[in-house]
Amino acid sequence: MSINNPVLVLNQNYQPLNVCNARRAIVLLGRGKAETLIDGEEHIATVSRRVPIPSVIRLIYMVKRPLVRRRLSRRAVFYRDGFRCQYCGMKSKNLTLDHIVPRSRKGAHVWENVVSACTPCNHRKAGFTPREANMRLLTTPAAPRPNPYYIFHHRQIEDEWRQFMPWME
């Protein structure tokens, strides 16, 4: 259904902000809050005319977005660590999460205390710290830097959007 087509929303300075559906984009256009930069191939028929469904719109006003810290999740930790065990360096899709300071010792569930580990290394370390288990971390864990374009990394990007996303070229 064309009213649910994805539409790229750009800030006043042409920086990608978000993706909304065509219905929301048409409302923004109708209220004078945005302008169409690229029309899509489909149209919506109204009582008096055919309205092209936009593919890219730009807001008339500037929206300041705060940089948001990324939420801690298993998948995010595995991506941060490159799907590599942080103790032995083995690359694998079958990893576990390991707390450097174990939860049983009041270790926090935060970016700086969680790493990817293969099952053998995780069992070997068990409830010890890396020093007590005589194991060394390959990298010091840290929270990923805030990235305003993170919402686009795991999304289907339309061809006509690419000109507004320089990091993709």
Image: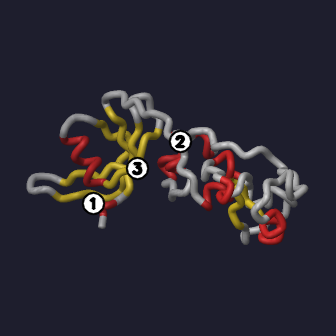
In the rendered picture of this protein, how many numbered marks are placed on residues? 3
Q: Residue visible at 41% across and 45% down? A: 18
Tell me how far mark 1 sits from mark 2, CA to CA.
32 Å
- For label 3, the crowd category at 10 Å Cα-Cα, with few meaning under 14, some 14 to 19 and many 20 or more, is many
Residue that label 1 marks? 3
Q: Tag 2, which secondary structure?
A: loop
**Residue 50 in view in this figure:** yes
Q: Is residue 138 left or right of residue 77?
A: right
Q: Tag 3, which secondary structure?
A: strand
Q: Nearer the viewer, residue 23 or 51?
A: 23
In the depicted structure, whether residue 78 falls above or below residue 17: below
Compare marks 3 and 1 and give the one earlier in the sequence. Answer: 1
- State which mark lies toward you, 3 or 1: 3
Q: Position of residue 142 (x, y in %)?
A: 69, 43
Tell me how far mark 2 sits from mark 3, CA to CA.
20 Å
- For label 2, the crowd category at 10 Å Cα-Cα, with few meaning under 14, some 14 to 19 and many 20 or more, is few
Q: Nearer the viewer, residue 30 or 134?
A: 134
Label 3 close to label 1 by CB (< 8 Å):
no
Tell me which amino acid carries mark 2: Arg
Q: Residue visible at 68% across and 62% down? A: 97
Compare marks 1 and 2 and give the one earlier in the sequence. Answer: 1
Tell me which amino acid carries mark 3: Val
Residue that label 3 marks? 19
Q: Position of residue 27 (x, y in %)?
A: 22, 46
Q: Position of residue 35 (x, y in %)?
A: 30, 37
Q: Nearer the viewer, residue 84 or 112?
A: 112
Q: Tag 1, which secondary structure?
A: helix
Q: Nearer the viewer, residue 20 or 101?
A: 101
Q: Position of residue 118 (x, y in %)?
A: 78, 67
Rendered-image quadrant of the C terminus: top right
